[in-house]
Amino acid sequence: MNVYDQNAHALHTLSETTEYAAAPAPKRTSRRGFASMDRSRQREIASAGGRAAHERGTAHTFTSEEARDAGRKGGVSISRDREHMAAIGRKGGEARGASAKRTADQPAPPPQQQP
């Protein structure tokens, strides 16, 4: 297997994992190119490119209609998974209940004097 095939295989394997960000980077065999840089350097360059695009006026800016459409599509997509939506609701309800319990368990602060 040549170096290209090894890297392609490593990237394919990483893309199949659910925790892509936590996975180690594939072994680098070349010191050239954007992909061979460490992630912080990649972020610096990408950030500079984004700023330059905004300064030139060539960056895409979502209109409210585009943003609304994207949100609708995302909502439709995620809400198809009933178990996932139930888990989200359960987590929110548990957090709210825990917060209310903590508040109820604390003694009320003394009233403040008005000057």
Image: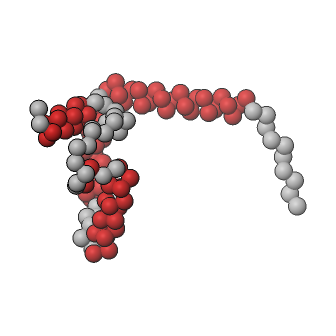
Q: Where is 55 relative to 82, above or below?
A: below
Q: Quadrant of residue 7?
A: top left
Viewer-proximal residue, 110 or 8? 8
**Residue depicted at 55% across the width and 31% down the height:** 95
Measured as percent of width and height from the top left, residue 45 is found at 32, 61
User: Residue 20 location in percent, x, y?
Assistant: 31, 36
Q: Residue furthest top?
A: 83
> Which quadrant of the structure image shows residue 60?
bottom left
Q: Is residue 88 visible?
A: yes
Q: Is residue 36 above or below residue 25?
A: below
Quarter of the figure with the C terminus: bottom right
Relative to 49, is 70 above or below?
A: above
Q: Residue at x 34, y 65 (%)?
A: 48
Q: Position of residue 102 (x, y in %)?
A: 67, 31
Question: Is 2 left or right of 19, judged from the image as shown?
Answer: left
Q: Quadrant of residue 66?
A: bottom left
5 with respect to 53 (left or right): left
